[in-house]
Amino acid sequence: MADLAYLFHGFAVAVTPFNLGLMLLGIVLGVIIGVLPGLGAANGIAILLPLTFTMPPTSAIIMLSCIYWGALFGGAIASILFNIPGEPWSVATTFDGYPLAQQGRAGEALTASFTSSFVGAFVAIVMITFLAPVIARFALEFGPPEYFAVYLLTFCSFVGMGKGSPAKILVSMMIGFALSAIGIDIVTGGLRLTFGFESLMKGFDFLIAVIGLFGIGEILLSMEEGLAFSGATARINPKIVLETWKKLPRYWMTFIRSTIIGCWMGITPGGATPASFMSYGAAKKFSKDGDKFGTGVLEGVVAPETAAHAAGTSALLPMITLGIPGSPTAAVLLGGLLIWGLQPGPLLFAEKPDFVWGLIASMYLGNVVGLIVVLSLVPVFAAILRIPFSIIAPVIVVICAIGAYTVNNSMHDIWFMLGFGVIGYLFKKLDYPLAPLVLALVLGNNAEDSFRQSMLMSQGSLSILWSNWLVGSISTLAMIMLFWPLIARVKKALRPAKAEKFPEEQPVD
Amino acid sequence: MEQNIGAGDPDGRAVASNRTVEAVVAALLFLFGAVFAYTSYKLGFRWAIEGPQSGFFPFYVSLIICAASAMILFHALRDRGPRGAAAFVERGQLRQVLHVLLPAGVFVLGIQLIGIYVASVLYIVVFMRWLGKYSWLKSSLLAVAIIVAFFFMFEVWFQVPLYKGLWDLTSWTGY
């Protein structure tokens, strides 16, 4: 119960006029970022990160995490009104959300989606509140082998739970590791793999990669579609909201199921996107209106939105307790913590309780504020989507360039950003997942460090990964995940396969 | 993606098939892995008295890149399915993409020479005029307004100086 006292302390930290103002600003910016194609939560936060360097860390993380909540809310607006998902995790929302909007029930669909987002996030935050301190205390005992085993599990999970080709997941991940190895070798202090280029001495900053891959890459993809938006108009008034809220409790089972799927996919690096598809699929299977899915049923909006928010929120759990982000956006937030001189991980709870509990308290507040903001300002945000793409696109490119420059005040980074943009475009079109690349780039140095330390402890024997029950079970689980595609293939050979339901389902987040 | 090969519309013609691009990208990735593996090998990938050498970790990472990209290449070359033959990008689409990519390249070069602010104004004006068919006046007014807002936000309020380029054209502002 001591944790609850900490939580109340956290509320005291979070509720200052300055922080509440930042929260509101963060949510509004986040929704705009979520609505615009080409700007997503990950690159949006990466771009705004340098602007927060002068703020106190707690205020900065409150604003940045609120941008994240805002982006999660915002993705749904573009999906429902315009049938273009603003974010990858809202693709599943278009299946039933857009038909509802076409029937003139956009208000209902939006209310249902925002409310279920809120419910999913809320449950995930409650889970974080109670689980985070436990995991952090547990992880205090971790040594290098345990850490390496957890890294191994994180990366093997991509292979085991990813939807695409395992070879592509591996390549993408290993490129991240290879790029992270460029520059100074943290163990010996020597330079490596710079190929004689001075600009490579500092290595690749993953924020640049995020801005290029997700920002520029997305713009190139959107351009291919030759964008011409046409959308339904949204009218939301308190009457529609209340009427929708009256209908929602009957989907309690969908809420519970989707939240569980979301929390699970968020903690393991499955991410919000696969979570939303899985949850939609499960809802369709178990609902009695299952065959009406896709024609505009409220339940089809509730399921993916609940899961996406639950996943997006719980991705922060491994980030603050272990220093291992569950999604690219969580990785960017982690990068922010490192820049502010805070080492995420179990010690953070002991050393900076103000920061951790301020952040957790702000998650509660941020989601309440977010719900109110999106419900009241939908028409404004929808208007943003009516700005022609030929104005939005160059402005987004300019914003990306500014963001890339401000990370390290380096002109080279803008060139790298452009290069990552082309890679992002190619990889997305060829179904190489981007999330493993980004996470490997972030965690590469730490993973290598813990690996080398473990190897020193054991004189180079891999048996240290099975030296006690804890590290042994994590490593074993990692191996099962790594070889899951093979195991699944054997299982498939024994049993007839079911048809692939969602071809769009790719682990892009 | 629909198959548009042979369609009458010249914009709908495929520039390259999925299979070709897949194979080329996999080959490039293999090359990337090979260069990295060789460099790490030179760096020392074995065990020294003080533990694994600098190149140990990147060496095995690049071996995995080579192995996995070889697998992708192999699959791409053997692929005879409709998805492999479908268009990776159609001519009209590629033109759209290059319409953004090439100016973006020129824009970055512009940043290097004349700084972020001036280059951004020119970039937005050209983009709006060329792809959006707006009048010069409308494009210029909007571009200048947006960039002036950015200037105040970064230089004045947040005090984050942005890149002014080799030839600083904004020095008269005093920032």
Image (cartoon, grey):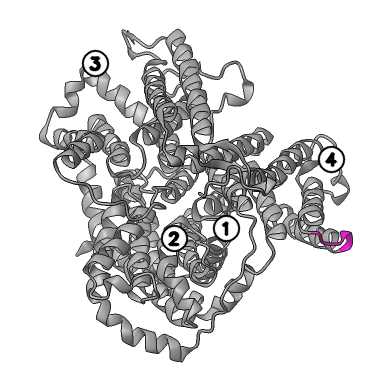
Q: Is residue A364 visible?
A: yes
A147 drawn magenta: no
Residue that sits furthest to the bottom in the current view: A239
Q: Whole-Å distance between the Cαs marked 3 and 1?
A: 48 Å
Question: Residue at 26% of width from left, 20% of height from top?
Answer: A455
Region in magenta = B133-137
Report which residue position mark 2 lands on: A91
Q: Is residue B28 above or below residue B124?
A: above
Pointer 1 or 2: first along the chain: 1
Direction from residue A452 to residue A195 in the image, left or right: right
Magenta part, dominant SS? loop
Marks 4/1 in contact by CB < 8 Å: the verdict is no
**Numbered label attached to residue A37:** 1
Q: Whole-Å distance between the Cαs marked 2 and 3?
A: 46 Å
B134 drawn magenta: yes
Chain for mark 3? A
Of the residues shown, which amino acid type is indicated by label 2?
Answer: Val
Report which residue position mark 3 lands on: A460
Q: Position of residue B100 (x, y in %)?
A: 70, 46
Report which residue position mark 4 lands on: B168
Q: Secondary structure at mark 3?
A: loop
Q: Secondary structure at mark 2?
A: helix
Numbered-mark total: 4
Taking depth in this image into account, of A124 and B37 the one nearest to the observer is B37
